[in-house]
Amino acid sequence: MKNIISKIAAVGLALGIGLGVSTAAFASEYPVNKPREVEWSFSGPFGKWDLGQLQRGYKVYAEVCASCHSIELLSFRNLEEIGFSKDEVKAIAAEFEVTDGPDADGEMFDRTAKPSDRIPGPYANSAAAASANNGAAPPDFSLLAKARAPERGFPTFIFDMFTLYAENGSDYIYSLLTGYKDAPEGADVAEGTHYNPYFIGGKALAMAPPLDEGSVDYDDGTESTLDQQSKDVTAFMTWAAEPYLIERKQLGFKVIIFLLILSMLLYLSKKQFFAALKKK
């Protein structure tokens, strides 16, 4: 029996080592630098949304990012979930026009947006977006914080299951926004691109640094630094991609606690059961 257990353990160890080696061998060489881990308000099982930060993040999106990027899965009324009042949402929606129809004559028409409308993007369609950006349409922001979530590899992802780490997309976006720098000597960077060691698709990307010191004026008096803007818009994008992130992690934490207690009870039950058998 001991020989069988030792063989199983050896096979498990070999598989673990093999998985680690294969992960390293086939991992992409990009990003050059791993995303920096940030202490977010929504980190961990006891995290929560910072509504002030989410509102500032929307402001950064609306005043800077919305000139190129859409967020088509978000409606104006969803902004109430991050602390905007109904009147504020109506005022925000009133700044936009959306296409509606057809009318009685079968024609489409433009009207002032309502809270129930989706937030319109800067371009009429993806073809127009690509045409205005050298053939590549800027990605939609709706799910970008989940789509741009680099794998952390073995064995890190195992620990992440217990720490409830779900901020790899957030860390990546923040690192990218703050990671622009001059290309090092000898780096092969195509003309018209911008070096960023945190970019997951290569050494450089076509998007120029979108944020700068003082790009927006915050209504709450928060200092508008590059770091602050990057954190705020990243938090907003994270919420937009998964508004129920907090509830999901809290539920996951409760499930882990339940499983630990259940495992302990099963162990004690098994111990008592076999102790009774030995007496017989």
Image: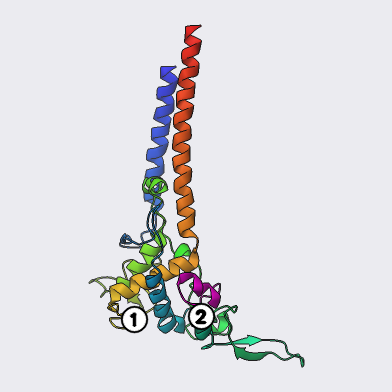
Residue 216 image point, x, y percent: 34, 83
In this image, 76 relative to 60: left or right?
Answer: right
Residue 32 location (% of width, % of height): 31, 62
Which of labels 1 and 2 is toward the front?
Answer: 2
Which residue matches tag 1?
Answer: 218
The magenta stretch is 71-89
Relative to 252, say whether 278 is above or below. above
135 displayed left or right of 20: right
x, y percentage for residue 45? 40, 52
* Callout 2 secondary element: helix
Q: Could you tell me the amino acid type at mark 1?
A: Tyr
Q: What's the residue at 37%, 39% (across, down)?
A: 17
User: Tag 1, which secondary structure?
Assistant: loop
Q: Is residue 199 visible?
A: no
Q: Quadrant of residue 109?
A: bottom right
Q: Which residue is the site of mark 2?
A: 89
The structure residue drawn at horizontal position 48% and vertical position 15%, both measured from the top left corner, is 274
- Badge 2: few (under 14), some or many (20 or more) residues near its Cα, within 10 Å? some
Amino acid type shown at disc 2: Val
Along the line of sight, which residue is nearer the eye, 197 or 102? 102
Q: Which mark is residue 199?
A: none
Residue closer to the observer: 21 or 42:
42
